[in-house]
Image (cartoon, rainbow, N blue to C red):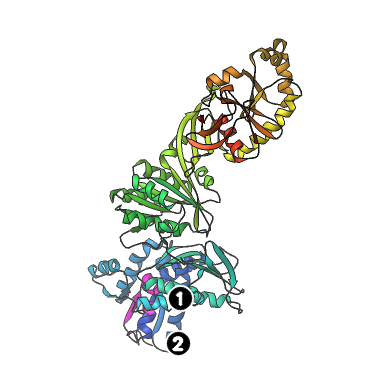
Amino acid sequence: MNDSREKYIPDLSVIVDGGITELVSTRQLQGVEVVVPEVVVLELEAEATNGQETGYKGLNELKKLREFCEEGLIDLKFEGAEDLSPAPPGPKGLDPVIRGLAQRLHGTLITNNKIQASIARSKGLSVQLHRPRGKDTEKSLEGLELLDYFDETTMSVHLRADTVPRAKMGTPDSVQLESISEKKLSSERLEQLTEEIVEVADVHPAGFIEMDSGGASVVQLGNIRIAIAKPPFSDAIEITATRPVKKTTIADYSYSELIESRLQQSHRGVLVAGAPGMGKSTLVQALSEFLRDSGWIVKTMEKPRDLDVSPEISQYRDLNGEMADTAEILLLTRPDYTIFDEMRQTSDFEVFADLRMSGVGLVGVVHATKAIDSLQRLVGRVELGMIPQIVDTVLHVDGGDIKKVFDVEMTVKTPSGMEQGDLSRPVIEVRDFETGSLSYEIYTFGEQVVVIPLEGQEQNRIWDFATSGLEDQLAQELPFDFDLEIRSNNRIAIYVADHHVPAVLGHGGKRVDALEKKVGLHIDVRTFAERESSSPTSPDFRVKNSDEYLLLNFDPSFSNEEIEISINGERVFSGAVSKKGRIKLTKDTHQARRIKKAQREGDKITVNKL
């Protein structure tokens, strides 16, 4: 080959996307001299060394050019070594160097970059702007060999060198890992699949490379998210591809009416929590569509952008590598609700908090095995008092359905288990949204932030069991009628007749001190009259426990009468009062437990004659 041949200088973009090899293979370039700048080779080497797919792909394209050269289709040279001294330019400095080489060689610059082409023309260079012909974009995705491993029930495909392909089949509530071939995959085979994935991502309008660094790459193709891992990041090459297997609506979930009502009322701060693969993304997609149908402007913040949502919903990723920069632009677009998928780093939670304080409705996705864990991720990252303003609703997803809904509110009170009034403080109450029962309290204790689980009904039942044991123990010391009430985990109250108070206290309080040491609890001594005057429950009867029964002792006017007992207006029990003014209820019945609970919690108990 001779030097009179036309010279063509490809830049980095047209090498990586396969444009230069396409021009040669289709004979659009033939019998010419292709001059590859040394700075491009150096950049591809650096990217491949760092495990970036673009580096591997570019080096493969250079290999194809060498094969074309050996076949006599082109002459291949590498020039511009002098441009590497004293130090090679970084990726952003490649284009000026490549333009300079093209100018020195009086050759034609080939690029797929419009800006590069425009600048080169303004400098008087000959330029060929090339867009890869490629395949039909829809067909290129449909023909992707990776899709051969999927069927309609496949949630994810897991391919690893020297192992058989496996896939998770089913739905989030019923997942099964299965081998889908008996033949092991070689590293070479996975390299081929990886190259094909990157090529399709280059030409498909719904394809893009989300991340490519250090042997880890994330590619989005339509609704398929593909994670590629290579050495040095992993010990062997592997490909993991996931896609949603079904699209849901809010009506398909438990608590749907509660959630719809809550989201329609105002801009909310919602956390969607759940373990990986339990259906968080599927729920979030349903929430986004519901919000859109409700007339809200909805946008998403994702990395990677893999939610399958309507075209009306704009999907943003991190701008300049920072979600904080995305948030700045997002506020200018004035969304009503934003879906933040997924939050992991401290900066993500800070952005979430900042957007909420700006008045934007937010739905954030957090990996957490328990609902309360998602709230704890905020502790220490934002001020404790701001948490209820940032998050007012927590949805816990497990097995593809919503298992728990928490309501988050701030109040000032004495935390549960503390009796002294001077211990009151701001407390975050986490309540079961359906029942209203208190599930957790979050508050500061000293310099620590504590999250205290409150078991609700379970704790009340434990107290019921404890009451029976304590009554038996105290009955050995108090040979007269008394009633026992558990106030907290470390305090009880004993109610006795007025004339028995001194016997319980003892001289100088010595006897009650001895009783406290014996049972290991603080004891408040009260009279029956004090309880009846202070309690919001009915004064028509007093409750006494025996080994097997709950004894209801009524006013004498109720003797031989048919009565009905109601709690907060709800009928709980009806029956006949004995001649002695008493009703005996077996302690393990629902009615007995309900009456004890009402007394303990101060509910309104009424007695009516029938």
Q: Which residue has dot 1 on it?
A: 196
* Picture coordinates of residue 262, whole percent (x, y): 38, 46
Q: Amino acid at mark 1?
A: Glu
Mark closer to the observer (2, 1) = 1
Farthest residue to the right: give it: 476
Residue under the image location 32 percent in, 51 percent down: 330
Q: How packed is label 2: few (under 14 Cα within 10 Å), some, or many (20 or more)?
A: few
Residue under the image location 35 percent in, 50 percent down: 337
- Residue stretch rendered in magenta on the structure: 1-20
Q: How many marks?
A: 2
- Which residue occupies the foreground of this view, 513 or 482? 482
Label 2, label 1: how far apart the Cα atoms are: 25 Å
Q: Amino acid at mark 2?
A: Glu
Q: Is residue 224 visible?
A: yes
Horizontal side of 309 relative to 500 (left or right) equals left
- Quadrant where the N terminus sits is bottom left
Q: Which residue has dot 2 on it?
A: 70
Residue under the image location 51 percent in, 34 percent down: 566
* Picture coordinates of residue 263, whole percent (x, y): 37, 48
* Picture coordinates of residue 42, whole percent (x, y): 45, 68
- Dot placed on the residue nearer the N-terminal end, 2 or 1: 2
115 w.r.t. 23: above or below: above
51 w.r.t. 270: above or below: below
**Residue 225 is covered by the magenta coloring:** no
